Amino acid sequence: MIHDLIIIGSGPAGYTAAIYAARAEIKPLMFEGQSAGGQPGGQLMLTTEVENFPGFPDGIMGPDLMKNMKAQAEKFGTQIIPKDVVSVDFSSSPFTIKTDDETYQAKSVIVSTGARAKWLDVPGEKEYQGRGVSACATCDGFFFKGKIVAMVGGGDAACEESVFLTRFVEKVFLLVRKDMLRASKIMQDRVKANPKIEIVWNTEVQEVLGDGVSVTGVQVVNHKTYETSEMTVQGLFVAIGHEPNTKLFVGQLTLDEKGYIVTEPNASKTSVEGVFAGGDVADHVYRQAITAAGTGCMAALDAERYLAHQ
């Protein structure tokens, strides 16, 4: 059987694409997760309350939002398969998508495998994700009003998010592994001019501390003195980069220098005709649930038009 459309990956982009495609009676088939590290349901499955997604004035838990999107996609006829895709072949049409035990073919494909934050991989970090540990200041800064937090990183993202956090928090400790920032000069100047930000040089987090409910501090080590100490903070933000889940598509689609899928301007079209991309797998700038959903919609509409012309 050759499917009209297969969606690889879920999250806001994948589920939105599925909703639009299913309502257009394309009968999409979706694989929720994928072997390159994607989280079924996307990064919102690792968050707590989402307050900036339109339509939820009282907020909604990240997993609940994804559960609702999934149910909506299924309501209109999307067939969702909880399997990982292990390989793809986009060299000829119909395209071939393989799982561990089956092979599928499709006239068109939407890739929505997302991206994942790079973490520190220290004790306590995973335990307190969503309970004081975050990789998105834009998403979670509001919840730390009046608190003291730490930010890990030395690039533009860490500096920009530290400045953003000062709108809400009492103080930000910017923990930098070396004795210099990698950020652009303008971002460095903004950080150094902000009285709420204190840069802590040559410092690395060894462990995230908590009381079983939320973060209470971090254990750090100074690389010059080799001394360890504990810092009292109520939140830890990690801004050491994101990694797109695109290992499956190396050699199949054009990727940029960071590994993100390259799409045409103002469209979801990739380097292969009939293959489209939406969400964080192609977006390293905005990385928000609402922008992912928007590009998922674009991908579905682009796929629908492509199929109509075949």
Image (tube, grey):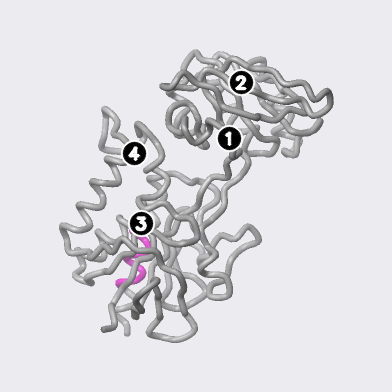
At horizontal 26% and vertical 62% (from top left) the residue drawn is: 80
At horizontal 27% and vertical 40% (from top left) the residue drawn is: 64
- Whole-percent x and y of residue 302? 36, 69
Q: Are marks 1 and 4 in contact (CB under 8 Å)?
A: no
219 left or right of 93?
right
For residue 163, which quarter of the picture?
A: top right
Q: Looking at the rendering, in which quadrant would you find the C terminus?
A: bottom left
- Whole-percent x and y of residue 51? 35, 31
On screen, 254 above or below 196? below
Q: Looking at the rendering, in which quadrant would you find the N terminus?
A: bottom left
Question: SS class of the residue under badge 3?
Answer: loop
Provide the residue designation for mark 2: 172
Main secondary-structure element of the magenta-colored stretch: helix
Provide the residue designation for mark 1: 238
Lower position in the chain sequence, tag 3 or tag 2:
3
Marks 3 and 1 sit apart, C-alpha to C-alpha, by: 24 Å
Question: SS class of the residue under badge 2?
Answer: strand
Q: Which mark is residue 62?
A: 4
Lower position in the chain sequence, tag 4 or tag 2:
4
265 left or right of 297?
right
On screen, 220 above or below 72? above
* Tally of numbered discs: 4
Provide the residue designation for mark 3: 10
Q: Residues within 10 Å of mark 1 (few under 14, many from 20)?
A: many
- Whole-percent x and y of residue 176? 72, 31
For residue 199, which quarter of the picture?
A: top right
Q: Which mark is residue 154?
A: none
Q: Residues within 10 Å of mark 3 (few under 14, many from 20)?
A: many
Is residue 254 something that shows in the picture? Answer: yes
Residue 303 lies in magenta, yes or no?
yes
| Residue stretch in magenta | 296-304
Question: SS class of the residue under badge 4?
Answer: helix
